[in-house]
Each structure stands twice: as structure tokens, then as C-alpha cells.
Image (cartoon, rainbow, N blue to C red):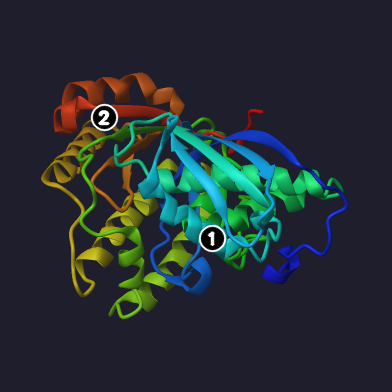
Amino acid sequence: MLTANDFIPKVYSQTIESGSFQWSAPSNIALVKYWGKKDNQIPANPSVSFTLNNCKTITKLVFAKKEKQDIFSFDLLFEGKPKEDFKPKILKFLERIEIYLPFLKEYHFTIDTENTFPHSSGIASSASGMAALAMNLMSLEKALNPEMTEAYFYQKASLLARLGSGSACRSVKGQVVVWGNQANIEGSSDLYGVEFPNAIHDNFNNFQDTILLVDKGEKQVSSTVGHDLMHAHPYAERRFEQAHENLDKLNAIFESGNLDEFIKVVESEALTLHAMMMTSMPYFILMKPNTLQIINAIWKFRSATKIPVCFTLDAGANVHVLYPENVSEKVLQFIKDELVGFCQNGQYLCDEIGSGAIKLA
């Protein structure tokens, strides 16, 4: 099992003066939720997610050697325009990862980033954004150290992404990704996400995720604050045990293809996540009235039609509607007929399982 120290490089065999890379990295949606963390972005419990395909961040990294090599130096552009309010988060990220990428202060970077989904849509852009940046930085390290193996490249990219945003480590590689130590999942690690190594039934091929944009406003409580509230949470320990149990259940469900059992675990996990928020001190509610309207409508539709459609939630009000590809037509019709009215400005995004980050240039 690799330790964090295994990702600290010794010496580089090459030098490089300037250049650029460009990567896209997708968002992901957790099925077993990560909520609560230890120092250095280590999760308090394991999680598993579907990697998305369409909701992604595209980031170009331009780099050039500089004379003064004592500080981090970078410009940050969002959709081609300077974005000063993102800079503190990037600076904090560079400070965290410098031990793993000791060349960072040698270059001036221009980071030009854009999302394929509307900014402030309530889609978690920190996961896709930090994963895309980590991929670019790893491309630079690979240029400095061409002997690097592909396995090490992706593991380290996931480790770096995690230090920017925990769930970003699940946006690097794989359709179904596990993050956190889990006894019966070989290779699983708290340090980085791994592709789910066990059998996955055809029922989950090209699974669909339609994201209903219920509330696009700024969350009243950030995920960072929410994670911290788990430290003194009265139900935290039982919750962490439950996550392990539910990951065990999903392990068997992925193999059997049992969609009824899948629905039970996934919806329970979503509601447990929000139950943790409602029972922390201070307590808070991120769901909106329309979130509950959608959930109830999904339950009613599923009961009436026996179509295996379910919901999950992130740390916010939006609803991810999950369903197999072979029922897409009926579910999308249901969404248009009954759920669009609960979305802000009638907005929703159609996505599906993808496979991770892609190098564009």
C-alpha cells in the first residue's frame, strides 16, 4: 500500500522551459456519501461515485520558467477573463501540494478554465476544477520525469486533486470510483480514488443522471464547514459505520444488478447526508421545498410505473435523477411533464456515466 511519502519525487531527469497542457475533468455524483474528514483531506468514511460525462471543467495550463523562484506566481482566468476571487483557493492548493511537486515555484502559470455547465448552477465545480488542474500539473511532472508509469500518474493526480477538494479525487479516472479504505475493495485508499475493481452488471452500463437545478443560489453553509461539524456530531460514529455497510451492499448490488436494492441504498444515503446536516450543531437545511416536491413525485411515479428511477442529492438543493439507459424515454417524459416546474427557470442538465479526465492538448 502506497503512503503519501511515496508521492514525493526525488530528482527529475529532464528540464523544460515553457509549454502548455489542456485537460477536461468531469464532475461526479457520490452514491455512498463522504461527509466528515480528518486532517489533510482524509475522509472519515469511504465513498463511491458515478463519474459524469457532460458536466466538466476544461482547463488550460500555460507555464514558463521565471527568474525569481521564491513565491508562487500565477494568473487565473475563468472563461478567458481574470477571476481574482478564485485565486485564494488556488494559492492554498499550491501550498498544500508543493511537497509533492517541488517545481511549482520555478514557473509562472496561467490557468485558463471554463465549465460546460452554467457557473453557480449548483453543480459542484470544485471537484471537476481541481481534478482538471491536477491533471495539467501531472502532465508537467511527467514531462520532467518521463519514466513515470501510467498507474502512478493517475494515482498521484487523484492524490493532488484530493488536496484541492476531497471529492475531486473521484473525477480523475474510472466510471465508478471508490475513495477511502474499504476491506473488500482491493487497492482502496484514503489517499486517492481508485476505479471500482469488482464486477459491475450490465444494468449499470451508461447509467443516466438528469440533474434538476432547484436552486442555483450560494449555499448558506459551505461543504467545508459542514464537514467540520461532523467532528462533534452525536451520530458521527454510527454514520461512518453505516457508510462502510452501504459500500459493502453496493459491492454486491453492482455484481447482481439488483436495481431495487440499488435504489434503497442510494436514496437512504442521500437522506442520511441531509439528516447529518439537520442534526449537527449548529444545524442547517440545504434542501428546498421543491427538493421535497421532486422526491415525492419520483416516489409516486416509481410506485405507479415500477420503473427503476431514483434520486440522490449532493450537499445542496438540486436533485440528481438516476436511471438505466433503457428507460430514458419514459423518465425524461416524466421529468418534462411533472418535475421541470420545480426547477429554477425550468433548468435541468442531462448527463450519464463517463470515464474520467481527458487530455485535450
Q: Is residue 178 left or right of residue 264?
A: right
Q: Position of residue 117 (x, y in %)?
A: 38, 31
Q: Position of residue 262 (x, y in %)?
A: 42, 47
Residue type for callout 1: Leu
Residue type for callout 2: Thr
Which residue shows up at 86% across the image and 48% down it?
Answer: 14
Tell which of 31 and 351 is nearer to you. 351
Tell which of 132 and 36 is nearer to you. 132
The quarter in which the C terminus is drawn is: top right
Q: Callout 2: 10 Å neighbours few (<14), some, many (20+)?
A: few
Q: Are marks 2 and 1 in contact (CB under 8 Å)?
A: no
| SS category of the residue bearing label 1 | helix
Give the quadrant of residue 339. top left
Select label 2 or label 1 by which is in front. 1
Q: Position of residue 21 (x, y in %)?
A: 66, 35
Q: Which mark is residue 305?
A: 2
Above or below, 330 against 128 in this view is above
Give the quadrant of residue 325. top left
Q: Which mark is residue 242?
A: none
Which residue shows up at 82% across the image and 47% down it?
Answer: 15
Q: Is residue 149 visible?
A: no
Q: Position of residue 163 (x, y in %)?
A: 53, 60
Tell which residue pokes out farthest to the front in this image.
Answer: 67
Disc 1 marks which residue?
163
Whichever of labels 2 and 1 marks the residue nearer the N terminus, that label is 1
Tell which of 88 and 118 is nearer to you. 88
Q: Is residue 22 visible?
A: yes
Q: Callout 1: 10 Å neighbours few (<14), some, many (20+)?
A: many
Give the quadrant of residue 333. top left
